[in-house]
Image (spheres, rainbow, N blue to C red):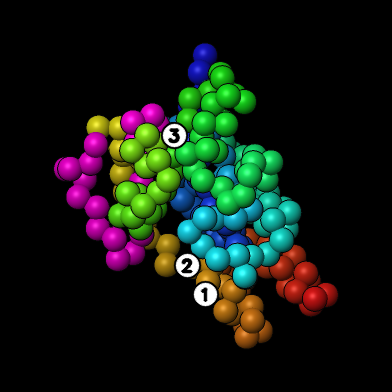
Amino acid sequence: MTILTGIFGGSFNPIHNGHTHIAQSVCESHLVDELWLMVSPQNPLKENRELLNENMRLHLAEVATRDIPGIHVSDFEFHLPKPSFTYNTMMQLEKAYPNRSFSLVIGADNWCDFDKWFMHDRLLQRYPIIIYPREGYDINKKVLPENVHFIDMPLYPISATQIRNNLRNGQDISSWVHPEVAKKITSFLSKQ
């Protein structure tokens, strides 16, 4: 039996409640059997000046999702060449896990820029794509390709950039992240 596995990639710098709500909503959509949070060591479209250590981001993602059924945190991209191109990751996942079929989970903002992705046309041909809403990005569901699915879910106006700014300014982040994640980040930064 083939396991339908959604890949939700990102820097998760840090993981926040918006990420976990999206992951949970995708699992509840029944478009996947399970969802892997693919922690990226380096996104090719982002600078890495403000990245927390990749192992720290992985650990925080595990902490934030450990009580959510169907969600697994993966370090698969840690073992691939950097930067992490989604097409390469998906191809390597297929080789490593032949009993699974993979789909890609992306935000509406990424869908609007999808034509800038490396091998975007092949990704679209080869894998189902699940899109979640992002504020300021309207998706016309009537013109989506057949294997692209838009999931209606509440918007979570939380950004990792905003959380990092709050941390820099010594402001509270506890309403945006898992309580244990807030504690661990604060403790980690106080040792810097």
**Would you identify the image quadrant in which residue 30 lies?**
top left
Q: Which residue is mark 2?
A: 158
**Residue mark closest to the camera, 1 vs 2:** 1
Ranked by sequence position, the earlier of labels 1 and 3 is 3
- What is the distance, in whole Å, between disc 1 and disc 3 at their CAs? 29 Å
Question: Can you tell which of label 2 and label 3 is closer to the viewer?
Answer: 3
Above/below status of 97 relative to 151: above
Give the x, y percent position of residue 172. 62, 79
The mark nearer the N terminus, 2 or 3, is 3
Q: CA distance from mark 2 to mark 3?
A: 25 Å
What's the magenta region? 124-145
Q: Is residue 163 left or right of residue 26?
A: right
Residue kind at label 3, given as amino acid type: Ser
What label sits on residue 103 in the rendered view? 3
The numbered disc on residue 75 is none
Q: Amino acid at mark 2?
A: Ile
Q: Residues within 10 Å of mark 2 (few under 14, many from 20)?
A: some
| Numbered label attached to residue 162 | 1
- Could you say which is closer to the camera, residue 167 or residue 80? 80
